Image: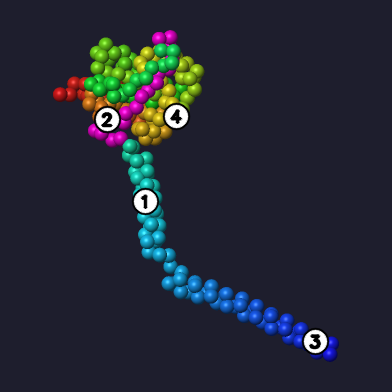
Amino acid sequence: MAEKKLNDRSSSLNEVTDDLTSKVIDVGNSGSEIKNDPAKRNVPPFVQGIIWVVVLGFLVFLATGLLRAQKGIVAIGEPSPEFVLTTFADDQYPQGRDIALKDLKGKVVVINFWASWCKPCESEASDLEEAWKYYESRGDVVFLGVDYVDTEPEARSYLAKFDITYINGPDLGTRISQLFNRNIGVPETYIIDQDGLLQYIKIGPFASVDEIKSVIDPIINRE
């Protein structure tokens, strides 16, 4: 009798094992069917459309960024981006003063990006100051120095070293340089005409005062 019960239990255990094995196989087959059945596997068309729109939009964004990096955000003949330069503080302006480009319409504006750690900047510093002195009395030309990624003590020492007297201020948060999409190198100079249009871009230092004048004079004297 005991042997019969043992055989019965063994038989029952085998049946349970076979049943579980069969179910596992069924699940595996079901998974295979899902993978092999396009109707069960494919994403709904409208979801596919959304995915493609997102992917294409991202690609367009990357392509636009690359083009801008190559040619710059603003091109010759286009309106200059508007900005406000806050000058270094002094006795007259303890908090600095805000110089808005929009308030300089009707004047030629020379925007020079520089830094105290920039050796090429030093080669043009005196020439820029001399050019500024040449045009200062006219009243229709403005020089703006934009100090890029610098510290104020070093920047002030640089301005004092070259006796620079035209308006200067730090590029806080690099906001101004980003507007012009610069090559992240200094010096660079942008010259804006009386109508607020960009007329000239200089990458690197000017070679002489005469070179600076040769760019500004035609803009001033055009009809």
Disc 2: which residue:
198
Do the residues under discs 2 and 1 have CB atoms within 8 angstroms? Answer: no
Q: Which region is colored magenta?
A: 74-92
Residue with the most extreme left position: 223
Which of disc 2 and disc 3 is earlier in sequence? 3
Which of disc 4 and disc 3 is earlier in sequence? 3
Answer whether residue 77 is magenta in the image: yes
Disc 3: which residue:
5
Q: Residues within 10 Å of mark 4 (few under 14, many from 20)?
A: few
Distance CA(mark 3)–CA(mark 4): 86 Å
Disc 3, SS? helix
Residue 158 vertical placement versus 10 (above, below): above
Distance CA(mark 3)–CA(mark 2): 100 Å
Disc 1, SS? helix
Q: Nearer the viewer, mark 3 or mark 2?
A: 3
Residue 173 quadrant: top left
Distance CA(mark 4)–CA(mark 2): 23 Å
Prevailing secondary structure of the magenta residues = loop
Q: Residues within 10 Å of mark 2 (few under 14, many from 20)?
A: many
Disc 4, SS? helix
Which of disc 1 and disc 2 is earlier in sequence? 1
Which of disc 2 and disc 4 is earlier in sequence? 4
Q: Amino acid at mark 3?
A: Lys
Q: Amino acid at mark 2?
A: Leu
Look at the image and tell me whether residue 159 can be seen. no
